[in-house]
Image (cartoon, rainbow, N blue to C red):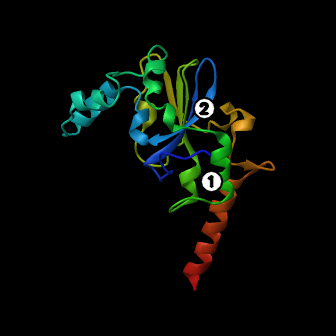
């Protein structure tokens, strides 16, 4: 039986699709795992007046400052226990197993180490797309078409179930607010 190390948590523990030369996998991790270029992140952090302990950050990243097409294999070894089969994510959606919002189950990022790109639908203010390695593309855009159909765990009978549930809850909330 499969057991999740973490539960999805809105804007904290996120679901990320990762494509490597050999496969596609979903990861469920803390969000900061996917800041691919920690050097760029550090510069902006310090520019905004905060201190940043690079030694500590690197200790959490297997001493890899930039996760790219050359370093990802070693980096991802640290997160093999965070790989989640699509079937397990589908169960979470189907059973509506989430904390505060169904949006916790929506994938936040897609990273393709072959094509050197990161696409983000992360719902909050951390712009992952700005912290990609040099010579990579980082954009905020819908990445559904890049996900293999069999791994689109949120689709049931050609319906985006996460959006459907979210819209239903929103419309109920609006009705309840008027009472």
Q: Mark 1 points at which residue?
A: 92
Secondary structure, mark 2, is strand
Picture coordinates of residue 173, whole percent (x, y) = 58, 73
Alpha carbon distance from label 2 to label 1: 17 Å
Which residue, as the protein is rendered here, is positioned at the far front? Answer: 1
Count neighbours of disc 2 (C-alpha within 10 A) and say few if under 14, some if 14 to 19, many if 20 or more. Answer: some
Which x, y percent locates residue 49? 18, 39
Q: Is mark 1 on a helix, strand or loop?
A: helix
Instruction: Judge from the rendering whether residue 44 lies leftward or rightward of residue 11; answer left or right.
Output: left
Q: Which residue is drawn at 63% across and 28% down?
A: 24
Q: In which quarter of the image is residue 54?
A: top left
* Total residue callouts: 2
Which residue of the protein is positioned furthest toward the top in this rendering? 70
Nearer the observer, 17 or 167: 17
Residue 26: quadrant of the picture:
top right
Q: In this view, does 52 lie above or below 39?
A: below
Q: Position of residue 167 (x, y in %)?
A: 65, 62
The residue closer to the viewer here, 68 or 167, is 68
Residue at the image position 58 percent from the left and 58 percent from the top: 102
Looking at the image, which residue is at 53% across and 20% down?
116
Q: Residue 83 carries which label?
A: none
In this view, the residue farthest toward the bottom is: 179
**How crowded is the residue under tag 1: few (<14 C-alpha within 10 Å), some, or many (20+)?**
some
Camera-side residue of 50 and 178:
50
Sequence order check: which comes first, mark 2 or mark 1?
2
Q: Mark 2 points at which residue?
A: 25
Residue at image x 66%, y 41%?
86
Quadrant (top left/top right/bottom left/bottom right) for the C terminus = bottom right
In the image, residue 115 above or below residue 58: above
């Amino acid at each position: 039986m499969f057991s999740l190390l973490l539960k999805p948590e809105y804007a904290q523990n996120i679901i990320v699709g990762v494509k490597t030369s050999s496969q596609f996998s979903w990861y469920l991790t803390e969000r900061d795992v996917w800041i691919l270029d920690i050097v760029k992140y550090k510069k902006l952090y310090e520019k905004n007046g905060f201190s940043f302990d690079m030694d500590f950050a690197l200790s959490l990243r297997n001493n890899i400052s930039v996760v790219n097409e050359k370093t990802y294999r070693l980096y991802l070894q640290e997160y093999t226990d965070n790989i989640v089969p699509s079937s397990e994510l589908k169960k979470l959606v189907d059973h509506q197993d989430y904390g505060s919002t169904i949006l916790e189950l929506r994938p936040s990022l897609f990273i393709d180490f072959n094509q050197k790109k990161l696409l983000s639908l992360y719902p909050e203010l951390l712009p992952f797309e700005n912290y990609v390695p040099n010579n990579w593309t980082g954009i905020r855009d819908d990445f559904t078409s890049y996900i293999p159909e069999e791994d689109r765990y949120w689709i049931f009978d050609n319906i985006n179930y996460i959006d459907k549930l979210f819209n239903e809850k929103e419309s109920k909330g609006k009705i309840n607010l008027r009472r």
